[in-house]
Image (cartoon, helix red, strand yellow):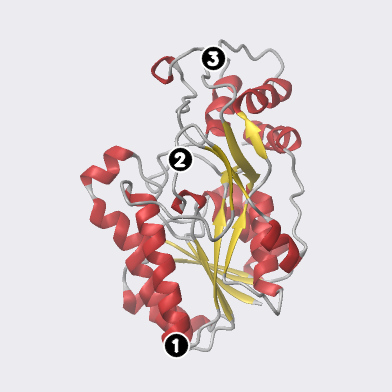
Amino acid sequence: MKILLTGATGFVPSNLVLHFYAAGDTVVAFDRNEPEARLVRELGAGWEARVTFVQGDIRDAATIEQLFVEHQPTHVVHAAAITPTLEMERADPRLILDVNSASTISLLQAAAAHGVERFIYFSSVSVYERRDATDYVVDEDGPLHRGDRMYPLSKITGERLCHWAQAHHGLDVRIVRPGTVYGPYERPTGARQSMSSAFLAADLALRGETLRPNAPHMTQSWIHAADVAKGVRLLLTTTDLPYDTFNLSGEPVPQARLIAAVVAAVPGAHVEWVVSEAEANIPLSADSGRLTFDNRRLWRATGFEPTYRIETGIEQYVGWLQGG
């Protein structure tokens, strides 16, 4: 496969670059930023033969068209996105919508015009409606977010555009909704300001600071970034997919288990549990719905199973952070 990957130097896409390359694919890695030196180093000798890093603005339709003309990708993974804080949403909502939604139109039209075999759109489990203080399992037909935050709103809009491209251009488009992702290359950037609890806990522990989490029973469906890459490639290569939308997440993990995994990976880390979100330096809303995401559709279609449990995944991630 020759894969055009957008947002390629970001957190999850950096893991996709490494996974695709290791699997023998050719990658056109498009992003506004240059790749980190560490990513290039981890690709190893001779990577230039099958990975091409291209810098540009995902919002520029002419640039997108030129990518297809010059590189002729057979597959597309559209992962470029801004993961904003609430302050970013308020300051520049149009930028978030332009990057996360409107850019998708140019990519879909170019992919259809140039005969792309399959197009993967990176959405998010944040598109699902949240039910306060309720334990429930969500499959791909679950009710969607009502639109009071820009990130899920922009992702729902992107999904709708994918359905439009399927209907009007006959493009093979699949939507993937990853769970709460952690692992190598998560770090604060201009596009990613909202950091996971896994990053916050590991970063604090490695700096020798006291971890102050709250909500020990609050769960999140954690998935290691390498497992996201594994699942996405299965969606690219499985020929007869019976659905167009797939959850891609791991097991539900209580905050207490996540913190225990970090302490096991960073001996000597000190933890002080606090009651309120305001006191915490690893804050979670104790009133948020405790969602479990149903992965059976993906498993039945592709045979996907995560490689990492939270304990082994955090151990790998801490080792990666220490090696930076």
| Mark toward the start of the polypeptide (3 vs 2) | 2
In the image, 136 versus 82, the foreground residue is 136
- Badge nearest the viewer, 2 or 1: 2
**In the image, 197: left or right of 259?**
left
Q: Which residue is mark 2?
A: 131
- Could you say which is closer to the camera, residue 86 or residue 110? 86
Quadrant occupied by the C terminus? top right
Q: Which mark is on residue 14? A: none
Q: Amino acid at mark 3?
A: Glu
Left of 277 or right of it: where is 2?
Answer: right
Q: Secondary structure at mark 2?
A: loop
The image position of residue 197, as x and y in percent, is 53, 31
Q: Which residue corresponds to the image point at 59% horizontal and 24% vertical from the top-left?
A: 217
Q: Is residue 298 visible?
A: yes
Amino acid residing under circle 2? Arg
Quick one: SS at disc 3?
A: loop
x%, y% of residue 152? 40, 52
N-term mark: 1 or 3: 1
Number of the label disc, if any, that sits on residue 209: 3
Q: Nearer the viewer, residue 273 or 3?
A: 273
Query: Residue under circle 1?
Result: 169
